Image (tube, rainbow, N blue to C red):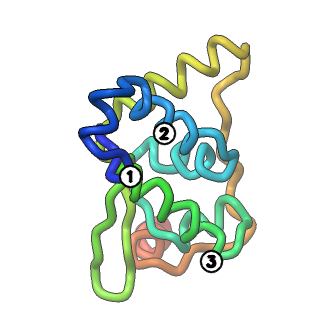
Amino acid sequence: MVLNMVSSKVSETRPFDVQVQIFKVLTHPARLAILDILRDGEHCVCHMEAHLGFRQAYISQQLSVLREAEIIQDRRDGWNIYYRVIDDRIYEVLDAMRRITGQPKSELKKPNVSCACPTCSTHVGKAS
């Protein structure tokens, strides 16, 4: 996992810069919540919006930071954009931090509103 924002020349002279940049990206609660949602696979912004209760624009800003850091990538399918984690080893870092801080694994709340994406609509249709 290499960050776009850190040049190879800088990382040669300052070997911890890449790690520092990753930790900086992980210091935002919304980004950690997004990564928790992505733990089980790819999801669209509307799905994250339903789970987190944040506005789409705010989630998109946080996704942009995670994407620039090359922690996540996106995939377009028609009108929907789906996001997924590039390297699952990021969860080893997050899980280690939970153990260090004594925090339990967060449980995602059921969304207050339904997600209208094709993936969720398909699941709803199958449940009926």
Whether label 1 touches label 3, CB < 8 Å:
no
Residue 57 location (% of width, % of height): 62, 77
User: Residue at 38% of width from left, 80% of height from top?
Assistant: 80
* Element on which disc 3 rests: helix
Against 26, is 41 above or below? below
Residue 67 location (% of width, % of height): 40, 58
User: Considering only order in the chain, which callout, 3 or 1, is on the residue closer to the N terminus?
Assistant: 1
Residue 27 location (% of width, % of height): 64, 40
User: Considering only order in the chain, which callout, 3 or 2, is on the residue closer to the N terminus?
Assistant: 2
Reading the image, the residue beneath label 2 is 21
Whether label 2 touches label 1, CB < 8 Å:
yes
Amino acid marked by disc 1: Met
Whether label 2 touches label 3, CB < 8 Å:
no
User: Considering only order in the chain, which callout, 1 or 2, is on the residue closer to the N terminus?
Assistant: 1
Against 58, is 72 above or below? above
Rendering quarter of residue 113: bottom right
Reading the image, the residue beneath label 3 is 57
User: Quadrant of the image for the N terminus?
Assistant: top left
